[in-house]
Amino acid sequence: HTHTHTHTSAPARCADTAPDAGQCQRMQAHAPSYCPLLSPASTSIDAPTTTHHPHPRILFPLRCAPKAATPAQTPIPVSKGCLCPPNHLNLPSPQPHFRQPPPHWGLPGPLSSAPQTLPVPFLQVLNMASGGGVPKLALAEVARKAMQEEMMQKPLTVSERDELIRLRKRVKYLSNRVHELEQKPFSRTGSATSPFDGGSGKRPHRRLSVVTNIGGYLGSSDARLAASAGQEGFTKDELSRLVKTTFDNTTAEDVKGVVLPEIKAHFMGGGEGLANGMGVSVDKGLNTADVPKRRQEFGANVIPMEPQTSIFVLMWDALQDPTLLFLCFAAVVSLFIGVVIEQEPLGWLEGTAILSAVVVVVMVGSVNDYQKESQFRALNAKKDDMTVVVVRDGEKREMSCHEVVVGDIMILSTGDIVSADGYALGNSDLSINEKMLTGETVNKRKGDYQLSADEKRVLRAPIIFAGTFVQEGEGRMLVVAVGTHTYQGTMQQKMVEADAEHSRSVLQQKLDAMTDAITQGGAAFAALTVVVLFVRMWFSFQANHCCKESWDNHVHWSEVLSFLISGVTIFVVAVPEGLPLAVTIALAFSVKKMLKDQNLVRHLSACETMGSATTICSDKTGTLTTSRMTVVKVFCGSRIFSSLDNVALPNPLKIAFIEACVVNTMSKTNLTAGPSHGVPVYTGNDTECGLLVMANTIGTGGGTIDYTSDDMPYKDIRRRYPEDQEGRKQLTFSSSRKRMSTRVKLPNGKYKIFTKGAAEMVTAICTHRVTADGGLEAMSGSVRAEVEAVISSFADEALRTICIAYRDSDTAVDDADEAERGLVMFGLVGIEDPVREEVPDAIRDCAAAGIVVRMVTGDNMRTAAAIAKKCGIIDQTIPMDAQVIDGKTFREKVSDKDNNLIQSEFDKIWPSLRVMGRSTPLDKHLLVSGLQASRLDGVPIQTVAVTGDGTNDAPALKKADVGFAMGIQGTDVAKNASDVIIMDDNFVSIVAAVKWGRCVYDNICKFLQFQLTVNITAIVVACIGSAVLTESPLTAIQMLWVNLIMDSFASLALATEDPTNALLHRKPYPRDQAVLSQTMVRNMILHSGWQLVVLTALIFGLGDVCTGHGDVCTGTVYINNYGSLRSGRPAAYDFNGVPGLCPPVYDPKDSSTFDSSGAPLRAADFCTEAHGGGGEKTQHYTMVFNVFVLMQLFNEINSRKIHNELNVLDGILKNSYFITIVIGTLIVQVALIEIPGVNTAFGCTSLTQDQWIASLLLGASVIPL
């Protein structure tokens, strides 16, 4: 088959006629970038032309070039058009002096005898590579057959397909040889001219290589991907697309319609073709020299964790809170007035106190966030640097998974965690657990795509995803994506997007709105007070009041400035500076206690947000269920046993039954002791582990099992039938047989074969079954009907039904079909991932709390619906078909072709939706987005919590108002995306989080009610003091103590209440409802009103007006109020109430204005001191201060209840913080008034016993309200 030809240099020309429209459309659909040409015999080069091709239209990866171009220098770019004009196709000239190909390149066979016109560029490059010695007829036939199948949509016969496969393999070898020639310059004369450079001395780009041209005709209808990606053949984005396409299309219909055409058209048919396109040898793997370049081009196999935010950045972020920024402004103003303008000795106190509150809030919040993140990282700091086995340079090598690059051939075996995305090579027996990725518990078989006979089920799929687990089997995988380009890595991008969308929490938004309202109200009060003061001043001048007889610059400008200061003071008092501290303390305290309820809170705001949750979108596996496959029913001897503790069968039959189950399991399947007593940890195949647990339970008669012991029943059986027993053989599971068998040799020299598998498949080949007494009966029609009825009933309960069978054999049968004939059915076992015992009660608690639980799972619809019924998620008042939907149907209904949510369509579905099966990450994300955006009339705005454990859940976890990740089974990606980590993976812990969330919300509302009551009272007292008395009855240092009570102490007392079950007996707080409820507003008005009545009576009803000093009037009493205390009010107020008591203005001409010595009766500083009371401490104002503080102290007890509860003392003794703080505050208050020196600093004086009793009674008077 080796011969030479005389080459011509005449350029090939395009056809003069175009193909018919339909044919062009078909060709364009397969390869839109190729140029379809007519290829009559006259355009071929050195090809026999005895006959014409019946379908001469073929595709060339060429572009039409100008006729004037030099053929030898014309490149061969990829075409973008459809038809070439005549005489514009130029090709490089052939080079006749190349090496002759080796003899074994010959392709004998009947196809080579069919003369045929060969595509010009295809034959041209082959001539260039082989010097004309290539069997062009055979290669032309390969191309023709490939195009016949791919372009003309004409199926090949079986023999034609086999021949085509054989020829393709030969041409693959040819392409590798041509590649070797291309890599080094070669010519007979020893020049450095490449055989492909057209004499230019420049090496052509890889995309123009022979491999590309051959690939275009040998199995890939679109080789342009291989041609456009440089040396490796594909870009990282294209390979990531392959992974995503496979993940998003899992049904048989999608595989046939989307995935297979994609792999065939763009990825060279997958498998070895894909490896060839990537420049990788399946047998030898990568060359070590290529690894650095691949790592540079495709990235390293690492998903870097974002560096932990520094404490200083967290502090700066905390300081951006609008309330804190305003407090800082208020503090600066207060410091400026107190230190610069008033120049009071303690003028710095108020501003410093406010700044101190800001510092405490910032420190507590940021330090708590930093600690929680550090705790999370410590929890998540497991060793992810796994050791893997890859093939490089033809040798197996162990290395870190971080060293793997795209193109590596990785060897996988049972127990491995896959560390990169890859394509399974060959007919592997790999069984992969993708639960962490999809939520499905059914293991996936990996290998070239294989559909069931009816093409309704996918039996095998080739893509293996990073993060999944090799349940069983061994095989090879071609790495196609690493690091951030794996499916796990792409989830990080959605998480970043969700981060950008994340807004402030529900309560934070409400508090921001309320703070704005309070700020505006405080500003209005301040402005009103200043206006009143100016009006009062003007009126006093008009009425010729004391010190208002005439304008005195020294006195009255200072008074005007004091008016402005009073306004600012009122404004500062109105600001709820203790609110951020209360929120922070409540959250930080709750976070610590929530950890005891198995909730690790990563973001503090998630606590209170859960209190408003209206919907919980929960995963199924591991959250609602135990994630442990368990045998829940056994059918044996015509009886169904729902409890394994007491299987009423003869003991020999029970022993034989569990032997049949245990012997026929993989040796790597084992049970080990776990952290929970009596609950084993599964190792290996989950289903087989369930059988081992059943064997233990039946073998001990339901007794206690010590999983640390080697005396468990299943281990006893394995010792009797060891793995290395003579004559033992395992016939592994196959998807076609749907069963596995194990042959063991008995002591008598005979053999017993144990079989287990899909119930329908195994029972069909059983000829007998075991009866209840241990005998045998034939599988008659009635018996089969009985068995089929049991299988059907198990299926209705969403149980995975497995048949256990056996047969005796005199000889060692090796053939599986022969070994599994004439089986005897032992019985059936129904296996499920059982619902956690506590989940149904928790679901009922959620329903009572007004929270709808929706199950979103990757499992099939039947299983999902059955589990939802057992959990109590299904609503009996709603039609079943409205509650259950599959992910694909949901996606088609609520999103457009670009996967954008159609809210109007979504709103038609979601109110009744309870279960979504076969869901994808997109479905879950759409569900969360739609719920959050919904604004249906009469339906509360939704606050959505989402649970998840897999990588696929990360976008939805980020999008949700609160994201819960599973601490045990959750992936790192899911945990990083979450707000709360459920340490025990239990749904009950989520309900506990709801309870804590409502408790936090209530505690903050309690403090808010308390502080706003104090603020209202303080503002009104300050307004009255400024507008009527010319000064506040409470000094700056006294207000500092009141603020300390309101801020720190009250925060600790009210924000540390523990949750009660009563919190779950009411509906969630509506998202659009103001944080201040009607009950709270009523309580605040009532309490502050009563306090103002009492304080007003004390300020104006007590205190006799007289001259002199002391606590009791000793001289003339001008105004006799209640009691005998001397007034502590400013003289400017008291003297205006007594005609003639005000000293006259000094007038040298009027003797009534000075005494006999000539000294003025009105001292120079009289008017200045008259507005400030002279700084004297009186029992009158001490009583006012004491009662004000005690009323706030007792009002703390009132504020413990905000929902109209009558008994405010209920549960008070359970909160030691509250008791300690109330008693401690009372002791400090006594010390401030009674200890000499301390009381002077606080502007107080000692009180009598009667005065203390009166103060306590007046303070406690707020409790009945």
Image (cartoon, rainbow, N blue to C red):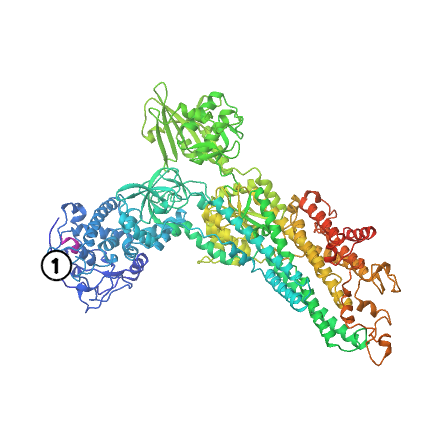
Taking 124 as reference, is 171 above or below it? above
In the image shown, does 247 or 39 lie closer to the viewer? Answer: 247
> Residue 545, image x and y in percent?
81, 74
> Residue 1099, image x and y in percent?
80, 61
Q: Residue 1058: which quarter of the image?
A: top right
Main secondary structure of the magenta stretch: helix
Q: How many marks?
A: 1
Residue 1205 among those drawn in magenta: no
In the image shown, does 844 or 383 lie closer to the viewer? Answer: 383
Question: Farthest residue toward the right?
Answer: 1116
Q: Residue 825: which quarter of the image?
A: top left
> Residue 571, image x and y in percent?
67, 65
Q: Please, what is the three-letter code of the amino acid marked with disc 1? A: His
Q: Which residues are magenta?
A: 127-132
Residue 47 appears in the figure:
yes
Q: SS of the residue at dot 1?
A: loop
Question: Farthest residue toward the top?
Answer: 748
Residue 769 appears in the figure:
no
Question: Farthest residue toward the bottom?
Answer: 1149
Write the residue at 40% across / 52% down.
484
Residue hosting label 1: 7
On the rendered structure, is 1258 left or right of 247?
right
> Residue 288, image x and y in percent?
27, 47
Taking 259 as reference, is 193 above or below it? below
On the rendered structure, is 821 left or right of 329?
left
Rate crowding at label 1 as few (under 14), some (14 to 19) or many (20 or more) other CA atoms within 10 Å. Answer: some
On the rendered structure, is 1173 left or right of 1055?
right
